[in-house]
Image (cartoon, grey):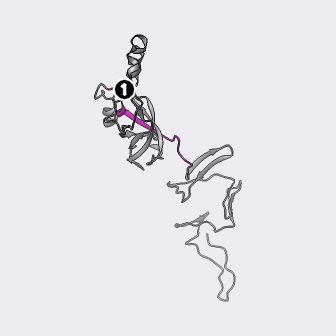
Amino acid sequence: MPQSANSYEQLSNLNINHSLGGVTEFNAVVTNLMSKIQTVTVVKVVAVSGAGVSPVGEVDVQPLVQMLDGAGNVYLVGKIFSVPYFRLQGGTNAIICDPVVGDIGLCAFASRDISAVKRNKAESAPASRRQHDWNDGLYIGGFLNGTPAQYVQFASDGIVIHSPTGITLEAPSIKLQASSVTTQTGSFAVNASQTAQFTGGAGISSDGDVKAGSVSLKNHTHKGVTTGGGNTGKPNS
């Protein structure tokens, strides 16, 4: 049994029964021409480039639906290289969830040659007259994959952000608006008068300074200290 095709060209599905003439032969010719048109197929990612905080990258993919010739022989399809992948992005705002090797997704094929558009990222004439071709694919991920270990879940009872390692928030200013925040080690409550209270657990830690009003946690001083070992006064404001 043949194991691989020499190119991306769709194999002919004609067989001896198509030589009967008339409508059968005409249908066979039309079907054969249609088989050369690529639309959408299921693929597996075999390589990724340009991931992370960078312009959207590309993937190399392996089509998972194999080809048949007119005699019923199965042929493996060659890999498709440098396929742009989808990222949810508007301007400079994006959700970065890049594909990884082994992901299964869809590869959609443009109706015309998009190679010049990929290079220029602008309006461009097609570099060739090819149509619905293997070389003009676009990857959309997220089909037939397994259970995630890290995720953002939109459930009926709220939103869950889960990470097995850690969550980092980076911003010049972070504002938390909530009536209460409950942790596995305690709770952090905020009442209507904008005061806060933390109970239980290991507390709240910070590498920098923490202030209550104008009082610095790291640099405040005490008053009312006696040499005989009495109680200190409140921190100086």
In what quadrant of the picture does the N terminus appear? Answer: top left
Q: Mark 1 points at which residue?
A: 12
Q: Is mark 1 on a helix, strand or loop?
A: loop
> Residue 117, located in which quarter of the rendered image?
top left
Segment colored magenta: 130-147
Tell me if residue 53 comes above or below residue 133 in the rendering.
Answer: below
Relative horizontal placement of residue 16, taking residue 230 as reference (left or right): left
> Is 139 included in the stretch rendered in magenta?
yes
Residue 220: give x, y in percent of width and height. 58, 72
Residue 134: give x, y in percent of width and height. 36, 32
> Is 78 included in the stretch rendered in magenta?
no
Specify the amino acid type for callout 1: Ser
Relative horizontal placement of residue 149, taking residue 43 as reference (left or right): right
Residue 101: give x, y in percent of width and height. 43, 48
Image point (65%, 44%), residue name: 155
Q: Which of 197 and 59 is in front in this view?
A: 59
